[in-house]
Image (cartoon, helix red, strand yellow):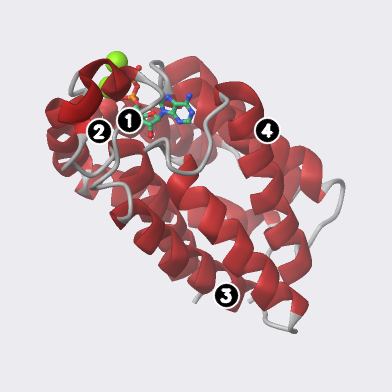
């Protein structure tokens, strides 16, 4: 499947559906070590994105990603809104003005997204945040792209690595964000943002399959 503006839009609709489906789970996770709004925040943002895509799909993959960024920044709120917004904004810039994304472009976009999240939130691997899911996802994506994999293979590898990265947050003590206020008591819980990152990449992979 060619990765056009239409297919990027379809993939983001798939993300919105997965976020809606897992809204309560994300709320529950955030209630354990945060303020319980992560599922609601993300669901509001992706629902807003879907209604914008319903009225019109921008002409290029980059423009679709930029619409996602501006919509998430203005509707999600909390810590995750600006972080996901920045991720999509950097991805939009990374892909540039092309009509169709190849595997290398998708892997590079993921790396730019991670760079944006790190620039904005200053979290490192092990701080118990979405960075713990996104970092291994980028490594896996780049390795598949470098060895001749396609877009679906890149996203599949990224999703699997993100899933494992998210699971790795369970024993960690949070050092960034609201969960860090709990200190040692944050250990033993899955980080909601790492979980949502894994869900997001899983939905993108599912759409590319
Ligand atoms: P808030 O904590 O403001 O209510 P959300 O609940 O929407 O925001 O998002 C919380 C998630 O944001 C956390 O689970 C974590 O993954 C992520 N997060 C918080 N701070 C940072 C940071 N500095 N860098 C990366 N991710 C972060
Ligand atoms: Mg929260
Ligand atoms: Mg909040």
Local crowd at mark 1 within 10 Å, few (<14), some, or many (≥20)? many
Q: For the residues marked 1 and 2, what is the alpha-carbon distance in whole angstroms?
A: 19 Å
User: What residue is at 58 percent from the left and 78 percent from the top?
Assistant: 153
Give the residue at mark 4.
89
**Residue 121 horizontal side relative to residue 186, left or right:** right
Q: Position of residue 172 (x, y in %)?
A: 29, 42
First of labels 3, 1 by sequence position = 3
First of labels 1, 2 by sequence position = 2
Q: For the residues marked 4 and 2, what is the alpha-carbon distance in whole angstroms?
A: 21 Å
Q: For the residues marked 4 and 1, what is the alpha-carbon distance in whole angstroms?
A: 26 Å
Q: Which residue reaches farthest bottom?
A: 148
Give the residue at mark 1.
174
Q: Position of residue 84 (x, y in %)?
A: 51, 32
**Residue 128 horizontal side relative to residue 115, left or right:** left
Q: Position of residue 185 (x, y in %)?
A: 15, 28
Q: Is mark 1 within 8 Å of ligand 1?
A: yes
Q: Which mark is residue 48?
A: none
Local crowd at mark 2 within 10 Å, few (<14), some, or many (≥20)? many
**Label 1: which secondary element:** loop
First of labels 3, 2 by sequence position = 2
**Label 4: which secondary element:** helix
Which quadrant: the N terminus?
Answer: bottom right
**Label 2: which secondary element:** helix
First of labels 4, 1 by sequence position = 4
Q: For the residues marked 4 and 3, what is the alpha-carbon distance in whole angstroms?
A: 22 Å
**Label 3: which secondary element:** helix
Give the residue at mark 3.
152
Q: Which mark is residue 39?
A: 2
First of labels 4, 3 by sequence position = 4
């Amino acid at each position: 499947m060619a990765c056009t503006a239409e297919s990027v839009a379809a993939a983001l609709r798939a993300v919105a559906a997965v976020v809606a489906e897992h809204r309560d789970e994300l709320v529950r996770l955030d209630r354990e070590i945060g303020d319980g709004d992560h599922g609601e925040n993300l669901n509001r943002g992706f629902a807003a994105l879907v209604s914008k895509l319903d009225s019109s799909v921008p002409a290029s993959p980059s423009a679709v990603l930029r619409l996602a960024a501006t919509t998430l920044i203005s509707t999600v709120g909390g810590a995750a809104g600006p972080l996901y917004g920045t991720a999509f904004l950097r991805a939009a810039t990374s892909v540039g003005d092309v009509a169709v994304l190849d595997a290398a472009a998708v892997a590079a976009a993921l790396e730019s997204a991670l760079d944006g999240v790190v620039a904005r939130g200053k979290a490192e691997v092990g701080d118990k945040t979405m960075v713990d899911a996104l970092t291994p996802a980028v490594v896996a994506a780049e390795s598949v792209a470098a060895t001749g994999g396609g877009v679906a293979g890149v996203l599949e590898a990224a999703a699997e690595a993100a899933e494992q990265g998210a699971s790795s947050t369970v024993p960690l003590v949070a050092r960034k964000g609201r969960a860090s206020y709990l200190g040692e008591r944050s250990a033993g819980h899955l980080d909601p943002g790492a979980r949502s990152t894994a869900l997001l990449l899983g939905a993108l992979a599912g759409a590319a399959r």
